[in-house]
Image (cartoon, coloured by chain):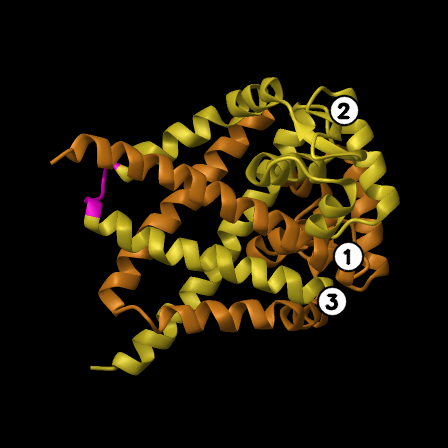
Chain colours: A yellow, B orange
Amino acid sequence: MSTRNSRSELERTAVQLFRKLGTRTVLFHQAAAQALGLFPTDLKSADILNEAGPMTAGELGKKTGLSTGSVTALVDRLEKAGYVAREKDPSDRRRVIIVPLTASKKHVKDLFRSLSESTMDLCRDYTEEELELIFSFVRKAADIMEEELERLKQ
Amino acid sequence: MSTRNSRSELERTAVQLFRKLGTRTVLFHQAAAQALGLFPTDLKSADILNEAGPMTAGELGKKTGLSTGSVTALVDRLEKAGYVAREKDPSDRRRVIIVPLTASKKHVKDLFRSLSESTMDLCRDYTEEELELIFSFVRKAADIMEEELERLKQ
């Protein structure tokens, strides 16, 4: 029994596997953005807005790591494409916030529908207990990715 | 017992979770590329070359979904940054192939080292059997992503 060997092999497999998934993910989002008439990074910023809700341009810049000028250009493109609207913050009328538009969510959802359906189909091959275990790992992997992103931006 | 409900909830969780991981992944690769002085998509193309080995510009265009002009500009940037070299195909001297350079792999690896280490640390919380199960799911998720990418490019 070479448990130590097979464990370190498994750990290397994890790195390769998540890297492979990462490459495919980046290429998929790139192609999806192109299909929607946006830059690759725009779609991800729209995703962040959909996840976190309305925020100021400054907050969006912090979350995406983009400069002030890049954020302005980004919001211009998203606004033109109908994905977001610039609105006055109801709690502070002097502040402008960027609001994700529901219509855009539907448009993006259409594009991602097949991916979502295939992912749900894949789940059907696993028991609930197995899925809980798998998701616990993927959730932590997503947290790691966020921590590493913070580290990179410093 | 509402097994049907909790299953469909689990399936929706899968979609949200992989989408969240996807967003973080895209942002991470964007920041990494920036740190390396490359465009966000360049690093992924370098990754494809590292995974699949030397190929022609035409083949790289097919794999990335980029136009001929974009591939030429991409290879120019990667060559200038020392990530790839244009070489004559040993099996057909009239063909030019793009070869990933080992030195570049090390450079990129340095940047990804912390991410790799955190991923390996995460593995230590799981048994080998659990990891096999998790990886079977992630492997299939990566396959789905590749199929969906092909579909999007059509």
- Label 2: element kind: helix
* Image position of A147 (left or right of B79): left
Q: Please, what is the three-letter code of the amino acid marked with disc 1?
A: Gln
- Which dot marks residue A79? 2
Tell which circle, 2 or 3, labels the residue nearer the N-terminal end: 2
Q: Mark 3 belongs to which amino acid?
A: Gln
CA–CA distance between discs 2 and 1? 25 Å
Residue with the mark numbered 3 = A154
As measured in the structure, the alpha-carbon distance from the residue carrying label 1 to the one carrying label 3 is 12 Å
Vertical arrangement, residue A81 with respect to residue A72, above or below: above
Quadrant placement of the C terminus of chain B: top right
Question: Which chain contains the residue that carries disc 3?
Answer: A
Residue A135: where, in percent of width, then height? 35, 51
Residue A85 among those drawn in magenta: no
Q: CA distance from mark 2 to mark 3?
A: 29 Å
- Which residue is depicted at the point 83% across and 49% down? A67
Left or right of A44? Residue A58 is right
Mark 1 — on which chain does it sit? B
> Chief secondary structure of the magenta span?
loop
Q: Is residue B91 visible?
A: no
Location of residue A44 with respect to A19 vertically, above or below: above
Do badges 1 and 3 share one subunit? no
